[in-house]
Amino acid sequence: MESRPPESCIEECVLWVKRARILEAKVEIRDEWDPGPRAESIDLMVKSLTLPSVDEIPILSAILRTLYDRKVGIYEYEALPLDEARVDRLTRLINHSFKTGRGIILVAPSLLPVSLISRLDQDKLEILESKLALEATIRYTNTLYLPDPNTAGVSSIEIVAKRNSEASYERAEWLKYMATRLGLRVERIRSLEDNTEILRYITMDGVNTLYTRIPVTKVASLVVALSRCLSLDGILPLEKRDTATHLIYALGITFDEARRIGERILGYTGMLVADMWMDIFEEHVNTGCSRGMASLYSRVLD
């Protein structure tokens, strides 16, 4: 059973999410989108609601506020921790939604659909490809970290990115540049499947590997939160102005609803995440921070 971290660690994790800012949003509505008939029930598939990336939050907020009059079920395909690969879980979710006949909204990073090509049946894949409704590009403040060369006692590191994530690859190159400026040698950039695998890898030798295997995903923010609440030396937080593109596939909503979702996303430009917060985020993000911090805490300190 995972050890429970101090409440201050969970609070620090939630605060990290809330104090991030959306610097800019761009939205493109696809003219060739085929929405299909309107559905009363919608399955919303997202990477994570319990521990969302900052760039996902304006998209999720816009969708939920626009579809307030529908029955929307939310399904995560990359919750932390997760015992199966995200593409396998997402494939199961899509197949289930098609089988039950409910509407579908899938919010996916720009490279994720490439992973689905070998998993989905050809007919389902063709249907999904015709349902690309919007493309949203979000620029936002993101938290990463490096070991402090003056106090961490390390001279070389490995950067750990997420496979099939364009934003993750770009962050890895940025962090490599920042590490070089600090005098740290980067041995390699390693790509792993998802955040659960990344968290396990960077804690393989307890707290020591937090300083030598540096993640560029949301796991980095968990490490920074843990370092703050436990006063761990040698963790140097970095703020990066990040950009991520999401593809929003939709089956069962109208053109007007898609337009309003896009307008809401654009309206979040310049806002703190705290300003677009919803009750559903409060409940789920607290749960996600508790689980994420517990996974990290138990592997680092037990």
Image (spheres, helix red, strand yellow):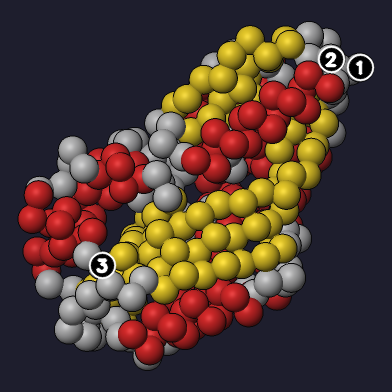
Secondary element type, mark 3: loop
Question: Pointer 2: residues within 10 angstroms few (<14), some, or many (20+)?
Answer: few
The residue located at (29%, 40%) in the rendering is 115
Q: Is residue 82 visible?
A: yes
Element marked by disc 1: loop
254, 53: nearer the viewer: 254
Tell me the residue that label 2 is attached to: 183
Q: How far apart are the two marked residues, 2 and 3, measured between alpha carbons? A: 48 Å
Q: CA distance from mark 3 to mark 1?
A: 52 Å
Precedes in sequence: disc 2 or disc 1: 1
Instruction: Point out the tag, 2 or 3, that comes first from the N-terminus.
Output: 3
Image position of 276 with respect to 237: above or below: below
The residue that mark 1 highlights is: 150
User: Can the viewer see residue 203 in this picture?
Assistant: no
What residue appears at the point 68 percent right and 72 percent down from the top-left corner? 269
Q: Position of residue 208 (x, y in %)?
A: 69, 15
Compared to 143, does 182 lie above or below? above
* Amino acid type of the residue tagged 1 in the rendering: Asn
Residue 300: which quarter of the image? Answer: top right
SS of the residue under disc 2 = loop
Is 243 positioned to the left or the right of 161 in the image?
A: right
Residue name at image x 41 percent, y 73 percent: 29
Q: Nearer the viewer, residue 11 or 184?
A: 184
Q: Earlier in the sequence, mark 3 or mark 1?
A: 3
> Horizontal and vertical percent for residue 32?
28, 72
